[in-house]
Amino acid sequence: MTHNTNLELIKPVGYSIENHPGSNRVKVVTISEAVVKQYAEKIAHLPVQALEYKPFNRFHVADVLDSLCDYTLGKFLLGTLSC
């Protein structure tokens, strides 16, 4: 599966992207404190065991984080992995 995402067109929402000091190929993604707090609140009802035993919950918590980033984080990560 190929994701033809132009990474330059993705405008980060709720996170920042920088090049790693040691290599331009490595990206440092920093999620804002506000997004982390909102994320923690939204998934607080899920114990770790629920993530271990119910695979769907892993997709759910990933979607929660991506939604807080206006669905730009997932696009960026998939685009980065397919480069």
Image (tube, rainbow, N blue to C red):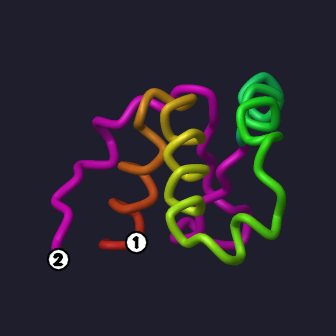
| Left/right of residue 6 with respect to residue 83 in the rendered view | left
Front-lying residue, 32 or 51: 51
| Residue 12 percent across, percent down from the top left | 50, 32
Q: Is residue 46 above or below residue 9?
A: below
Front-lying residue, 2 or 59: 59
| Left/right of residue 42 with respect to residue 25 in the rendered view | right
Could you tell me the amino acid type at mark 1?
A: Leu
- Residue at 67% in and 56% down: 28
| Left/right of residue 72 with respect to residue 35 in the rendered view | left
Q: Residues within 10 Å of mark 2 (few under 14, many from 20)?
A: few
Q: Are marks 1 and 2 in contact (CB under 8 Å)?
A: no
In terms of secondary structure, where does tag 1 sit?
helix
- Residue at 31% in and 72% down: 83
Of callouts 1 and 2, which one flags the residue occurring earlier in the amino acid sequence? Answer: 2
Q: Does the magenta run of residues contain 66?
A: no
Front-lying residue, 35 or 51: 51
Q: Which residue is mark 2?
A: 1
What residue span does the magenta drawing correspond to?
1-30
